[in-house]
Amino acid sequence: MVTQAQILQWLEAYATEIEENKAYLTELDAAIGDADHGINMDRGFKKVSAQLPTLTDKNISNILKTVSMTLISSIGGASGPLYGTWFLRASTAVADKQELTPQDMLELLQAGLEGVLQRGKAQIGDKTMVDVLSPSVDAFRQAVEEGTLKAMQQAVAAAQKGLQETIPMQARKGRASYLGERSIGHPDPGGTSAYLMLKSLLGVLDSSR
């Protein structure tokens, strides 16, 4: 089971991961975007981090919904709505729960992905966070019977592979798409932050064994 306390630890770990990679994410975005992805994500997750101590008595759904509202109100550009939607949909998939079974975790990840697909209208191959999130959900689903930790290990491995596969892609969505062939040769910034999100969740599950 993934506990409410582990969800809070994950969000804190992700906020730290974003802070540590702020310059790198901004550098990636400078190559093919607005050069603000790391700055925006760090601003949003610093606000999330500041909220976490007030959420210790909330259920997982309420925690994720609070994260969503915080991100939507504090992150500019496309990232705020996309990550805000991911966390909002994730929250609705686990209504009133204090702990999550492997199946609950799958539904959380699936709902988040579906929210991003509907909000961003991107497909696999467009060089976006979908190229990271979609294979990770598929991998989690295939390994769900082995338990959350094993499934998450498979999901993160698939996310990392998906991120690598964005490098040779030409962007077809967002600001990067204006660059045409010049968008080739760089990993997608949103895909990178999505990979860090999943990796930080695995880190918390791994350390709790």
Image: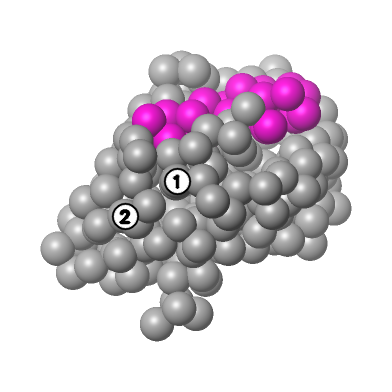
Relative to 148, residue 96 above or below? above
Cα distance, mark 2 to mark 1? 11 Å
Give the extent of the magenta segment.
Answer: 70-92
Residue closer to the observer: 74 or 132: 74
Which residue is at the front of the view, 95 or 199? Answer: 95
Q: Nearer the viewer, residue 205 or 139?
A: 205
The picture places residue 104, in percent across and down from the top left corner, at: 27, 48
Q: Residue at x 44, y 71 (%)?
A: 205
Above or below, comparing residue 164 to residue 126 in the picture:
below
Q: Does residue 173 show up? A: yes
Residue type at mark 2 is: Leu
In this picture, residue 144 sits left or right of residue 26: left
Instruction: Residue under label 2, please give it.
Output: 100
Q: In the rendered view, does 179 fall on the left or right side of 184?
A: right
Neighbor class of circle 2 (other Cα within 10 Å; few <14, some 14-19, many 20+) is some
| Mark 1, secondary structure of its residue | loop
Query: Residue 61's x, y, as percent?
Result: 43, 39
Q: Residue at x 49, y 63 (%)?
A: 6
Q: Is residue 14 above or below residue 132?
A: below
Q: Main secondary structure of the magenta part?
A: helix
